[in-house]
Amino acid sequence: MGLLEKELARYQRQMLIDDWGEEGQKKLRDATVFIAGAGGLGSPAALFLAAAGIGRLKICDPSEVFMTNLNRQILFREWDIGTNKAYAARQALMELNPHVEVEPIDEKITQQNIAGLVADSTIILDCLDNFASRYILNRLAVNTRIPFIHAGIEGMAGQITVIHAPETPCLACIFPEPLPSKKIFPIAGAASGMLGTLQACEAIKWVLGMGENLKDRLLAWDGKLMQFHEIEIKKDPGCPVCGNST
């Protein structure tokens, strides 16, 4: 099915990009992106994916909006405080682009439910703030070979990579042990905006088959120095998650 007249007008400028066009826009419309976490990373990622015309967004977050979220979680407003983030996100995203289907998921990610939650998704975005849930997503991505875009932030710094088993290292290869965590960690809204936007960009490129993704590369960003560093990453043949995947 062709694009509607309103869609052609809405997406006109991006369809002018080489390797995009109307056929690329249809690919975006047919894609489903699973966004794990609607917080500092998930907010900008979801907004830019919806703006780009991804056909279906599955937003998974069991938590509610707090006042302390509002410096970085730009999907939300003060009137959303006390509301589940996934449902508040759907409202904001549908107001931004009514052509996008948004499925809110008010569930905590577990080993038991993750396969059903992700199901028919084209790509997974790790917008989480804890490694326990990230490792669950990572294992699912390795087993299903669904591309998995990891990002993490703290303060004015962050990192991002694209994982696709069996071609690339998985998250457990890169981080065999969880990074030290704090109950409350510092974070700047612009930093989460930077990394979440890069996640959206990588997801769009993946769906379009455009350019090169961050496979086998961890892109680290230092916001204080405004420097990017690219780190080569390799598969761990002894990795308990992806070591035997071929």
Image: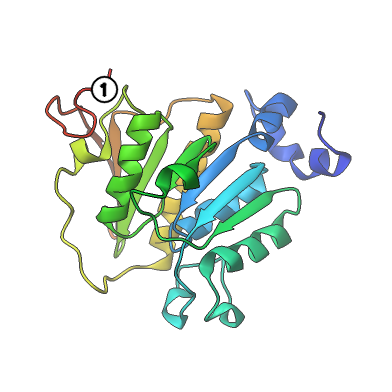
Image quadrant containing the C terminus:
top left
Q: Which x, y percent locates residue 220?
A: 28, 45
Check disc 1 and give the amino acid type.
Ser
Q: Residue at x 44, y 26 (%)?
A: 212
Q: Which x, y percent locates residue 150?
A: 36, 44
Q: Which x, y percent locates residue 231?
A: 23, 36
Q: Left of 203 or right of it: where is 27?
A: right
Going by the picture, which residue comes out furthest to the left? 238
Total numbered circles: 1
Q: Left of 35 or right of it: where is 162?
A: left
Q: Can see residue 122?
A: yes
Q: Which x, y percent locates residue 19?
A: 62, 23
Going by the picture, which residue comes out furthest to the right? 5
Going by the picture, which residue comes out furthest to the top? 246
Q: Residue at x 48, y 74 (%)?
A: 64
Going by the picture, which residue comes out furthest to the front? 112
Q: Residue at x 41, y 47 (%)?
A: 114
Image quadrant containing the N terminus:
top right
Q: Which colour scheme appears in the figure?
A: rainbow
Between 47 and 110, the one nearer to me in the picture: 110
Q: Left of 166 or right of it: where is 82?
A: right
Q: Can see residue 226?
A: no
Mark 1 element type: loop
Q: Residues within 10 Å of mark 1 (few under 14, many from 20)?
A: few
Q: Residue at x 58, y 40 (%)?
A: 32
> 219 above or below 36?
above
Which residue position is annotated with label 1? 245
> 236 above or below 105?
above
Image quarter of residue 95? bottom right
> 185 above or below 129?
below
